[in-house]
Amino acid sequence: AIDKAVKSAGGEDYESVRYEGYGPNGVAFMVDCLTDNRNRTAMLVRSTFTKRGGNLGTDGSVSYMFERKGSIVIPGEYDEETMMMTALDAGALDFESADGNYLITTDQNTFTTVRDALEAKGYVFETAEVTMIPQNYQTLTDEKQLMQIEKLLDGLEENDDVIDVYHNWESEDEE
């Protein structure tokens, strides 16, 4: 009775939940949510997948396709060689230049060390986060398939409980 009273007195109890599934054309999705009602969120996520041509999977059905890594994006206005040496010396796994930006990939455990080393040298980040990166990508070219995936992404992002959506879809333009 005391626990129930504490919760009703404003002590909302939120929990983190991850849902995994497949969208149209075999695109893998992982959906991270923060909710105060696990049943409601599961129903809404399942409904979104079903209405947009996908299906919700079980725990582990797609998570093996993703790796948790650090990702740092820095504008391409800096000297590439100097930045690359700083990042690699601090423990970065990979450094690449694409679309006018530098993308630095780190292990999740060395992310903070690499980020701090770059920050100490005065580099400004576009993004710096630990995220789920797919091991391989699913490329779609058909206009109908692209619209189905975009509708699923939009539907998931409209849900207030959804925090992050990870997928292995890559548009033809990104190749």
Image (cartoon, grey):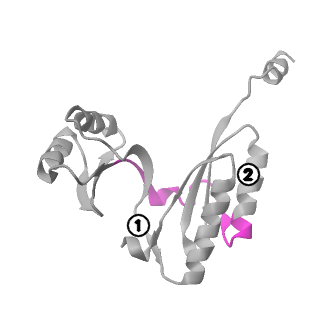
Q: For the N terminus, give its image quadrant.
A: top right
Instruction: Residue at 75% x, 55% y: name it.
Output: 44
Q: Which residue is mark 2?
A: 42
Range shown magenta: 49-72
Q: Is residue 140 left or right of residue 105?
A: right
Q: Position of residue 63 (x, y in %)?
A: 52, 56
Instruction: Residue at 76% x, 40% y: name it.
Output: 37
Q: Is residue 102 left or right of residue 147?
A: left
Circle on res. 169: none
Q: Is residue 147 left or right of residue 38?
A: left
Q: Position of residue 5 (x, y in %)?
A: 84, 18
Q: Which residue is mark 1?
A: 136
| Residue 48 position by quadrant | bottom right
Q: Position of residue 80 (x, y in %)?
A: 16, 53
Is the C-beta separation of discs 1 and 2 under 8 Å?
Answer: no
In the image, farthest residue toward the front:
77
- The amino acid type found where label 2 is placed reads Ala
Name the foreground residue: 23 vs 171. Answer: 171
The answer to whether residue 159 is above or below residue 122 is: below
Q: Position of residue 164 (x, y in %)?
A: 56, 50
Query: Within 10 Å of the Cα at label 2, are there few (<14), some (14-19), or many (20+) other Cα atoms?
Result: some
In the image, farthest residue toward the top:
2
Instruction: Residue at 36% x, 47% y: name it.
Output: 126
